[in-house]
Amino acid sequence: MDEAIALAREGGGQDPARRHGTWHGTSGTAARRGHHAPRPAAAPNTGDHAPVAAGGDSAPRSPRATAQADQAAREAEQANQADPAHQGDHSHQAEHAHQGNHSLQAEHAPHTGQAGQAQHNGQAGQPQHTGRPGQSARQDGQSPSDPPPGHKNRQHHRHAATPWPEARAIAARAARAVPPPIPVPVPLDAALGLVLAAPLTALTDLPSFDSSAMDGWAVAGPGPWDVCADGILAGHEVPEQLADGEAIRIATGARVPGDATAVVRSEHGRLDDKGRLHAQREVVPGQDIRPRGQECRTGDQLLPPGTLVTPAVLGLAAAAGYDELSTVPRPRVEVLVLGDELLTEGRPRDGLIRDALGPMLPPWLRALGAEVVAARRLGDDAEALYTAITTSDADLILTTGGTAAGPVDHVHPTLSRLGAELLVNGVKVRPGHPMLLARIRENQHLVGLPGNPLAAVSGLLTLAEPLLRLLAGQGTPEPYTVPVRDAVHGHPSDTRLVPVVVRDDRAVPLHYYGPAMLRGIAGADGLAVVPPGGAQPGQHLEILDLPWALSGIGVCFT
């Protein structure tokens, strides 16, 4: 059975999300949502960049170094303003989203030895910026360079981000390394959306007896035929034998008498005034009779392991004699939402913002085949995060925010404290590059998502989706491409994920795809994978499907 689940993880079945050739998206209404007038250039370039390494120079930089940094910032800003879809991908988003995605950049203030903190006016002893609205650092009497309680060292050194395709491959390999779960027998009415852990094998011949394919007459021998008084209905006992020259009324699905040679459809027969049946078309032996075992014989494999249980699969299983199915259990996910600045109701106010990820992530994870066992808010509390991770029995822990190197970004220090193995520590993708994947135990992983909403979606699709699909036994969908209708601005060295709709067999890029924005993806069919340097009109781009765009909310959110 473990081998069956392993085969399921390798994609032994047919994934309903797999596409060959052209991808057909939603209606043009959704596509038109994405067309808007160009927006003003974003604020100076202070966001969605690789985390600044902590522990830098504690003294102010020289005028020459400052001038060089200012020049670099101006050049970066000019490049950003050239991006027609630039919606804050490189701007400081502290007032818009959880700051795990945007550490305060070093070029805006001298280093203090603590990443994410800027020394006010370059003088020691002044209040330190925390990178979070409404917060002032070091009100507990510690010096700016002291680590928070419970942590030996807050310094995180610059690391080389993983290329986007490689990051997804690493996530898939991590899932394959997890020991296969024990298959779970599930009643048919609870199996929708699960994956077969074993082949679906026919328990009987289908059909299990010779049956009529049409309403009409079962006839024996050549016509015309004398019609018997009785008829045969579906579900009734075995009918009496027919003699040559006899016919009997029969309903669709009813058992055909043993000596019957054919079924004459009602519309193809005529009764004369003596009650004899005449065929109005040639009668071919065996016509409109479904022979026993026409669809399958007992023991035939109907579907391989790894097949997603759809309504049609449930129907086939029932027809083949099943009351329950052996399935791969759903991977269990716990969501930990980090950030003191998040509200759960009402409008943003007083420097606080609404939590967009808490409502969005659990149903998205269920759409990927996961069971969400908990979704909790922890705020910016290192000890609470440590306790939550060490006491969780989920297969995957998903955190939001706190993945950079700021003073309240606790994910890296907590993983270090746990002795977790970092498999991916930053990805060369925009938005969302400060994402991470860690192995906590042999059968438990953690995916750290950036705090900005669209950056979090990027992390979800890059690291969590490949991991969860394989843990759920679904396998990996075959990539497919669609030509893009318009030119798409790209990042010089990183992959960019851009929301699109598909109309007339072309992907139409949508606006509003900055890291803090959900407006674009809310009307999208999928995300186009834009290579470094961008794409020209007509260029084929890989499309990452959104689960509900293909199978509908009623199916994939069970």
Image (cartoon, rainbow, N blue to C red):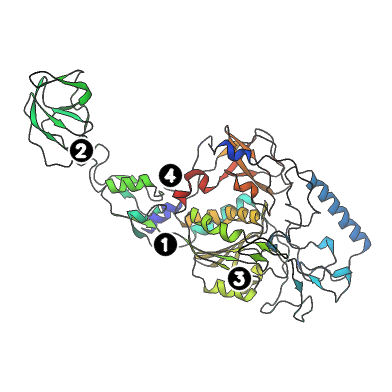
- The span from disc 2 to disc 4 (Cα, nearest Å) is 28 Å
Relative horizontal placement of residue 457, taking residue 550 as reference (left or right): right
Relative horizontal placement of residue 245, taking residue 329 as reference (left or right): left
Residue lying furthest front in this view? Answer: 346
Reading the chain from its start, which is encountered first: label 2 or label 4?
A: 4
Q: Which residue is mark 1?
A: 181
Q: Within 10 angstroms of label 3, few (less than 14), some, or many (20 or more) residues?
A: some
Reading the chain from its start, which is encountered first: label 1 or label 3?
A: 1
Disc ID at residue 292: 2
- The span from disc 4 to disc 3 (Cα, nearest Å) is 39 Å
Relative horizontal placement of residue 288, taking residue 151 as reference (left or right): left
Task: Say which element carries label 4.
Answer: loop
Q: Is residue 172 visible?
A: no
- The span from disc 3 to disc 2 (Cα, nearest Å) is 62 Å
Q: Amino acid at mark 2?
A: Arg
Q: Which residue is mark 4?
A: 14
Q: Residues at badges 3 and 2 in contact (C-beta under 8 Å)? A: no
Disc ID at residue 378: 3
Q: Amino acid at mark 4?
A: Gln
Q: Nearer the viewer, residue 294 or 240?
A: 240
User: Which of the 4 image quadrants contains residue 170?
Assistant: bottom right
- The span from disc 1 to disc 4 (Cα, nearest Å) is 21 Å
Reading the chain from its start, which is encountered first: label 2 or label 1?
A: 1
